[in-house]
Amino acid sequence: MKILLHICCANCAISPIEKIRAEGNEVVGYFFNPNIHPYQEYQKRLDTLKQYSEKTGLSVIYRDEYLLEEFLRNVSHREKERCQYCYSLRLEATAQEAKNQGFDAFSTTLLESGHQNHALIKETGERMGKEVGIPFYYEDFRQGWRRGVEVSKAMRLYRQQYCGCIYSEKERFLKESKESKMSNDKVQSSKEIQTPNVKAKDSNKTQNSDAEVHGSKEIQTPNGKIYDLEERTGRFGEMIIEFVKTLERNEVNGRLIGQLVDAGTSVGANYMEADGAESKKDFKHKIAICKKEAKESKHWLRMIRKANPQKAAECQKLWQEAHELTLIFSSIILGKKG
């Protein structure tokens, strides 16, 4: 079966394409996302898909049209229905293209996202399929989300931080609380975070901290040392790189090394993004990613220790550093709540 797959972005396409191909089907991409805002974001997603398609040999049909004014005219005064309009716009165009080009069915990578209205996408796709006269290929692609993240990071693809439309961009930068003011959503580019009294507990106990955030990047750890987080997270990534160079190259280590390097070096990269965040909400989101990557580093270090018992001491040292970073980021997040 030959399927035309609507693609909202390269990252969301990875798992659905693998799934469709694994079932013995041929897949061709279709890019039509005319209301992504701002235009620079639209161009980044378009360019990233071209980059991905060239690397993977994916054929893509590009309908490169930017129709922001048309989108705003259709959702003005009924903003709550904007997602329905978005889904219908994209899926109707995909279904029509699939019918005109002789495809057997059509689908969409929107089904990969856990942030979208999955049931509404499915209902809209099936409805458009009936109206145009071509089957809608349904799969719950959300199960492959993690796989998509891992591959996109390994390929160093641009990863967007919001759905795409002007409304979702607004929600990204504004706090949901009605009491918050727009002026409070702006943070100084020179802001610094300080987290005193971070307590590193035993690895088998629940992680906790009573630290508070005061506006300095310098972190005081239990041993009394002061670290600049930008330097510390960067140093952690360097330690990971130097460590993996000492590991034997075999089938097991080969897979584990890639995962550890990816997670370990991402901590510092995401902290740099957090330090340059454009809003408090964006800052908290980036810090949460730092915490996630630090925790993931702990997991892969555990696996490498299992596969390389002779490296236990080195793994433990790196694991402890990843553990302390996890606690630090947890305390920053807790300090920012409320």
Image (tube, grey):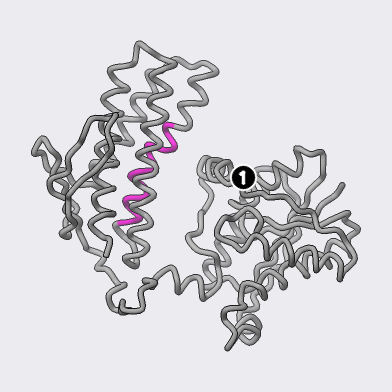
What amino acid is found at the position of numbered circle 1 in the picture? Gln
Q: Residues within 10 Å of mark 1 (few under 14, many from 20)?
A: some
Which residue is depicted at the point 23% across and 57% down?
Answer: 335
| Left or right: residue 209 compared with residue 157 | left
Q: Which secondary structure, mark 1?
A: helix
Quarter of the rendering occupied by the C terminus = bottom left
| Left or right: residue 221 compared with residue 157 | left
Q: How many marks?
A: 1
Query: Could you tell me residue 82's position as x and y percent?
Result: 61, 76
Which residue is depicted at the point 82% across and 43% down?
Answer: 25
Q: Which residues are magenta?
A: 260-274
Which residue is depicted at the point 20% across and 36% down?
Answer: 200
The residue closer to the viewer here, 81 or 248, is: 81
Query: Could you tell me residue 330's position as x and y percent?
Result: 28, 48
Q: Is residue 149 above or below residue 168?
A: above
Identify the residue at the far left of this view.
224
Q: Is residue 74 above or below residue 326?
A: below
Q: Does the stretch in magenta take in 262? A: yes
Q: Which residue is mark 1?
A: 143
| Left or right: residue 20 compared with residue 276 | right
Q: Is residue 29 above or below residue 238?
A: below
Identify the residue at the far front of this view.
205
Q: Is residue 187 above or below residue 68?
A: above
The residue closer to the viewer here, 304 or 246, is: 304
Which quadrant holds residue 192? bottom left
Q: Does the stretch in magenta take in 272? A: yes
Query: Could you tell me residue 145's position as x and y percent?
Result: 58, 47
Which residue is depicted at the point 23% across and 41% down?
Answer: 232
